[in-house]
Image: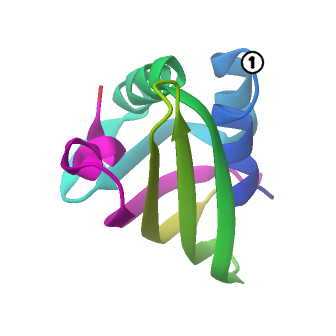
Amino acid sequence: MTDICSALHDLLNTDEDLEAVARRHFAEDYKQRTNGSWDDRAGFLEHIRHLRSVVQSVEIEVLDEFVSGTRYADRHVVTVFKNDGSVTKQEVYVFAQLDSAGKFTTLEEVTLMLTGDADDRDLGNAK
């Protein structure tokens, strides 16, 4: 079974092929809502490609995590170290659904910027 910390690490802290990472953590019909905006799997991967172009690395601190059957929830803080030297910190609230293989099928998240530039407020939706 996947979890948000493993997925974010593989997506943003490695040079591993994005499609391979996506296959490991996300179902083929994956969809995500971030701060009210829905993306299908293709839109989500476009977002991650953009992040890979501006993010040097991330640190993830899971504050709370709950799994019950195919339901997954967590609250985590992600510290984003950008290529331009700036740092942004966001608290993220996640509610997700897992398939029988333990991959995310649906993930809904809300982000709260704790520190960073005003331009980074929408980093969770940037493409």
Residue 77 among those drawn in magenta = no
In-front residue for pair 100/91: 91
Query: Where 2 sits versus 29, above or below?
Result: below
Question: Is residue 4 something one can see in this rendering?
Answer: no
Q: Residue at x 38, y 49 (%)?
A: 32
Q: Is residue 120 above or below residue 74?
A: above
The crowding category of the residue bearing disc 1, from other C-alpha atoms within 10 Å (few below 14, some 14 to 19, many at least 20), is few
Magenta segment includes 112: yes
Instruction: Give whichever of 70, 87 is nearer the camera.
Output: 87
**SS under mark 1:** loop
Residue 50's quadrant in the figure?
A: top left
Give how far across and how far down residue 16 sits, in percent.
Answer: 77, 19
Is residue 95 placed above or below 86 in the rendered structure?
below
53 and 24: which one is in front? 53
Numbered-mark total: 1
Q: Position of residue 48 (x, y in %)?
A: 48, 29
Q: Which residue is mark 1?
A: 15
> Viewed as shown, does residue 121 lie left or right of 86?
left
The magenta-colored residue range is 101-126
Out of 43 and 8, give the one closest to the viewer: 8
Q: Residue at x 35, y 47 (%)?
A: 124
Mark 1 residue type: Asp
User: Residue 1: where, in percent of width, then height?
Assistant: 81, 58
Q: Which residue appears at 23% of the width and 59% of the height?
A: 35
- Quarter of the image for the C terminus: give it: top left
Q: Is residue 69 left or right of residue 84?
A: right
Residue 16 in sight: yes
Which residue occupies the extreme front position in the image? 85
In the displayed structure, 91 sits above or below 59; it is below
